[in-house]
Image (tube, rainbow, N blue to C red):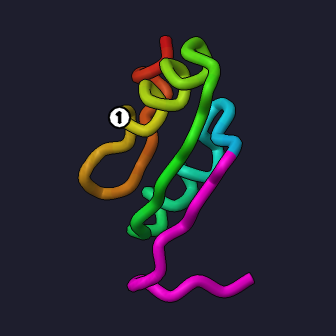
């Protein structure tokens, strides 16, 4: 699937945030929805762990 930079990616079942992380790494806007608080925390930490260059640091999770 192709997504232009102006499109917003919607993930209705965010889980651990893989789709949102990929969207952020590709400089896309996204909306992630998760009902489970524990998974939301995991996804939130993963998304916040991406730096300004769109790179995830392994040290963020250690």
Horizontal side, residue 15 vs residue 26: left or right: right
Q: Residue 46 at x, y = what percent? A: 48, 31
Is 51 in front, or is 44?
Answer: 44
| Quarter holding residue 36 | top right
Vertical comparison of 18 with 34: above or below? below
Q: Which residue is mark 1?
A: 48
Residue under the point 50% across and 88% down: 4
Q: Residue 3 at x, y = what percent? A: 58, 83
Mark 1 Cα within 10 Å, few/some/many (few <14, many 20+)? few
Looking at the image, the residue that sits furthest to the front is 35
Is residue 38 inside the magenta stretch?
A: no
Range drawn in magenta: 1-12
Looking at the image, the residue that sits furthest to the left is 52
Q: Please identify the quadrant where the N terminus is shown.
A: bottom right
Is residue 7 inside the magenta stretch?
A: yes
SS class, disc 1? helix
| Quarter holding residue 28 | bottom left
Residue under the point 25% across and 52% down: 52
Q: Residue 12 at x, y = what percent? A: 66, 49
The image shows a total of numbered marks equal to 1
Residue under the point 43% across and 34% down: 57
Vertical comparison of 38 with 30: above or below? above
Q: Residue 42 at x, y = what percent? A: 54, 21
Vertical comparison of 38 with 5: above or below? above
Vertical comparison of 51 with 44: above or below? below
Please, what is the dominant secondary structure of the magenta stretch? loop
Residue under the point 40% across and 66% down: 29
Is 38 in front, or is 60?
Answer: 38
């Amino acid at each position: 699937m192709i997504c232009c930079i102006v499109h917003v990616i919607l993930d209705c079942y965010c889980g651990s945030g893989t789709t949102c992380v990929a969207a952020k790494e590709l400089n896309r806007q996204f909306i992630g929805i998760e009902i489970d608080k524990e998974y939301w925390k995991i996804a939130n930490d993963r998304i916040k762990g991406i730096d300004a260059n769109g790179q995830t640091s392994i040290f963020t999770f250690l």
